[in-house]
Structure formats: C-alpha cells, structure tokens
Image (spheres, rainbow, N blue to C red):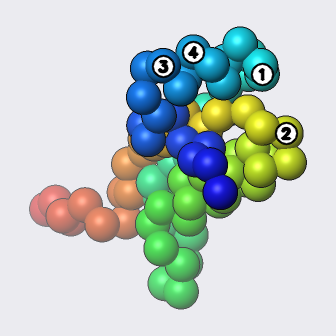
Amino acid sequence: MKTIRLLELSPKELSRRVAKKPLLLIPIGTVEWHADHLPLGVDSLLSVAICEEISLRTGCIVAPLISSGVCRDLQPKRG
C-alpha cells in the first residue's frame, strides 16, 4: 500500500501525487480531559483516523496533525 502521509513522501512523489489529486487533509484536534477512561489526545487521535480513512477512499494526502489545548484538570492547584 502506498503511503498517505505527507511526512513519508519524497518531494518528487509529493509533486506527482498533488498533480493527480490537489487535495491535502489537515487533521486538527485538541488535548483535553474528557474522562478518566479516555486519553487526553482522543480528539487528535480521532481527527487523524478520520483523515486517514478519507485519504484511503479518495487518494488525497494527510498532513501532520495540528494539536493544541490545555488540560486544566492536570495543572497544579494553587492556594
């Protein structure tokens, strides 16, 4: 199976693929607490999984994850 991830492509392969399908998916997710049974990056992980599934169906490329957020529940308590 050929790669779908931008970071794994050579410049030449990227140019060839973009010429065929000029579409790039950018997964975006947050880092935050949802519950004790879920990882802090569940939104980011889901975003990547969804983009990869779309890529497998369409042939577009998946860019690296953009992930941000603050998990206030894990910050030290003051006072």
- Say if 39 sits above or below 62 in the image: below
Q: From the viewer's side, name the closer residue of 64 and 61.
A: 61
Residue contact at pointers 4 and 3, CB within 8 angstroms: yes
Type of amino acid under label 2: Thr
SS at badge 1: loop
Q: Position of residue 22 (x, y in %)?
A: 74, 16
Q: Which residue is mark 2?
A: 58
Pinpoint residue 71: horizontal percent, then vertical percent.
39, 57
Q: CA distance from mark 4 to mark 3?
A: 5 Å
Check disc 1 and report the residue beneath it: 21
Q: Secondary structure at mark 2?
A: helix
What residue sits right under mark 4 in the picture?
15
Which circle, 1 or 3, is nearer the viewer?
A: 3
**Residue 7 higher or lower than 70, as above or below:** above
Q: Earlier in the sequence, mark 4 or mark 1?
A: 4
Asked which secondary structure carries label 3, the reply is helix
- Does the residue at mark 1 contact the one at mark 3 (Cβ under 8 Å)? no
Q: 30 and 5: which one is in front?
A: 5
CA distance separating discs 1 and 2? 9 Å
Does the CB distance between marks 1 and 2 fall below 8 Å?
yes
Residue in view at x 78 percent, y 38 percent: 59
Describe residue 13's horizontal placement relative to residue 79 as left or right: right
User: Are discs 3 and 2 less than 8 Å apart at CB?
Assistant: no
